[in-house]
C-alpha cells in the first residue's frame, strides 16, 4: 500500500491526493509539519519538503509534479493527462502557474512569521505574483467546464477546481 506524507493544508499534496483518489489507489495519509523537529520527511526526501509518496516497493518519490508523472506513467487508468502534445503542454503550463502561485503564498507565509524586519517590498512582490498568476489562469481557462480537453485532468486538479470523488 502507498503511504503519502502530507501536510493538511498543502496544495502540493492535495494534487497528489486527488490523482490517487481518481486512480482509485488506496493510500495511508501521514500528516506532518515539515519544519517540526519530529518530522520524518528528511529521512525520505533530502530536500525536506512534502509531499513524499512512499511506494509499496519501498521507494520514496517527492516533488508533486514528479509524483503526478510517476502515478500517470505507472497507473495510466483513468488518464489525467491529455493524449495530445498541445493538450499535455497546456495542462503542464497550468500546473506550472498554480505551483508558482502556491510558492508565492508559502513565501508570504514565512515572511509573515518573522518577528521583526518583514520586507514590505518582498511581500508586495509575492502578492503581485499571486494576483497576476490568478489573472493568467482565468484568461487561459476562461468559462470552460474542463481546464483542458473534455474531461477532468491535471489542469483541473492543479487549480483545485475539481475532484470527482470523495477526497481521501
Ligand atoms: N515544489 C514542491 C513544493 C513543496 C513544498 O514547498 N512543500 C512545503 C509544504 S506545503 C514544504 O514541505 N516546505 C518545507 C520546506 O520548504 O523546507 C512540490 O511541488 O512538491
Image: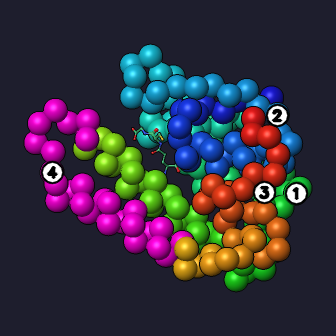
Q: Is residue 37 visible?
A: yes
Disc 4 target residue: 119
Q: Which of marks 3 and 1 is nearer the N terminus?
A: 3
Residue 147 picture location, percent across and down: 69, 71
**Distance between the Cα atoms at labels 3 and 1?**
11 Å
Horizontal side, residue 77 vs residue 110: left or right: right
Disc 2 target residue: 26
Q: Is mark 3 within 8 Å of ligand 1?
A: no
Which residue: 80% across, 29% down?
Answer: 1
Horizontal side, residue 75 vs residue 37: left or right: right
Disc 3 target residue: 73
Vertical side of 6 occupied by 109: above or below: below
**Distance between the Cα atoms at labels 2 and 3?**
17 Å
Which residue: 74% across, 70% down?
Answer: 146
Q: Can residue 62 be seen in this view?
A: no
**Distance between the Cα atoms at labels 3 and 4?**
42 Å
Q: Nearer the viewer, residue 60 or 142?
A: 142
Horizontal side, residue 137 vs residue 162: left or right: left
The numbered mark at residue 131 is none
Residue 150 picture location, percent across and down: 82, 74
Q: Earlier in the sequence, mark 3 or mark 4?
A: 3
Mark 3 lies on a secondary structure that is helix
Mark 3 and mark 1 residues within 8 Å of each other at the beta carbon: no
Q: Magenta residues?
A: 112-137
**Distance between the Cα atoms at labels 1 and 4?**
45 Å
Q: Is the magenta stretch mostly helix, strand or loop?
A: helix
Amino acid at each position: 500500500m502507498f503511504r503519502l506524507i502530507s501536510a493538511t493544508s498543502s496544495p502540493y499534496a492535495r494534487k497528489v491526493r486527488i490523482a490517487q483518489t481518481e486512480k482509485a489507489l488506496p493510500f495511508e495519509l501521514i500528516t506532518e509539519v515539515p519544519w517540526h523537529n519530529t518530522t520524518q520527511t528528511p529521512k525520505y526526501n533530502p530536500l525536506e519538503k512534502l509531499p513524499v509518496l512512499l511506494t509499496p516497493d519501498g521507494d520514496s518519490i517527492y516533488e508533486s509534479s514528479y509524483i503526478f508523472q510517476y502515478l500517470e506513467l505507472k497507473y495510466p487508468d483513468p488518464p489525467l493527462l491529455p493524449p495530445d502534445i498541445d493538450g499535455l503542454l497546456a495542462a503542464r503550463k497550468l500546473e506550472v502557474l498554480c505551483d508558482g502561485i502556491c510558492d508565492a503564498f508559502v513565501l508570504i507565509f514565512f515572511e509573515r512569521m518573522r518577528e521583526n524586519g518583514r520586507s514590505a517590498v518582498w511581500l508586495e512582490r509575492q502578492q503581485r505574483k499571486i494576483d497576476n498568476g490568478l489573472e493568467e489562469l482565468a484568461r487561459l481557462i476562461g468559462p470552460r467546464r474542463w481546464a483542458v480537453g473534455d474531461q477532468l485532468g491535471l489542469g483541473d486538479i492543479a487549480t483545485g477546481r475539481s475532484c470527482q470523488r470523495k477526497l481521501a
